[in-house]
Amino acid sequence: MEAPHSTALGVLLAAGSGTRFAGSQHKLLAHIDGQTIFSRSLSAMIGSHLDGFIVVSGALDLKGHIGDIEEVHNMAISAILRKFIIRIGKQVNAVP
């Protein structure tokens, strides 16, 4: 008997303004070992092999950093999650 497939969505929360970060640029674009913090986080999420990915942005425009992954501004996340859930055939009422 085949195990039922569950669907898991990776959501990278990257909407903060970074006001407590003391660097010269936004914290998501700061480098650690030659890679931005955002890039490291995105790579880890993609490497998890989940069923889908969304990046929630806010203070920083990340379109040039995410390839074909869906980006949503933090004010629109509830609607985007509903759309994704409908696309994969899950219950919409699971999202507020």
Image (tube, helix red, strand yellow):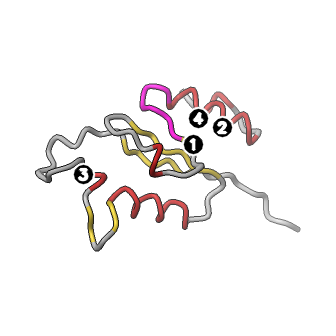
**Quadrant of residue 6 within the rendered picture:** bottom right
Above-or-below relation of 80 to 23: above
User: Residue, x 58% and y 32% (percent of image)?
Assistant: 80
Q: CA distance from mark 3 to mark 1?
A: 21 Å
Closer to us: mark 3 or mark 4? 3
User: Residue, x 27% and y 68% (percent of image)?
Assistant: 32
Q: Where is residue 54 shown, x and y percent of the image?
A: 54, 45
Which stretch is magenta?
71-76
Q: Where is residue 69 shown, x and y percent of the image?
A: 57, 48
User: What residue type is disc 1 on?
Assistant: Glu
Count of residue discs:
4
Residue located beneath label 3 in the image: 27
For mark 1, give the secondary structure. Answer: strand
Residue located beneath label 4 in the image: 81
Residue located beneath label 2 in the image: 84
| Tag 2 near tag 4, CB within 8 Å | yes
Q: CA distance from mark 1 to mark 2?
A: 10 Å
User: Residue, x 39% and y 64% (percent of image)?
Assistant: 40
The quarter of the picture where the C terminus appears is top right
| Tag 1 near tag 2, CB within 8 Å | yes
Disc on the earlier residue, 3 or 4:
3
Q: Is residue 1 left or right of residue 64?
A: right
For mark 3, give the secondary structure. Answer: helix
Q: Where is residue 30 shown, x and y percent of the image?
A: 25, 58
Disc on the earlier residue, 3 or 2:
3
The quarter of the picture where the N terminus appears is bottom right
Above-or-below relation of 48 to 19: below
Disc on the earlier residue, 3 or 1:
3
Closer to us: mark 1 or mark 2? 1
Q: Is residue 94 left or right of residue 71?
A: right
For mark 4, give the secondary structure. Answer: helix
In this view of the protein, which residue sits in the foreground, 73 or 93?
Answer: 73
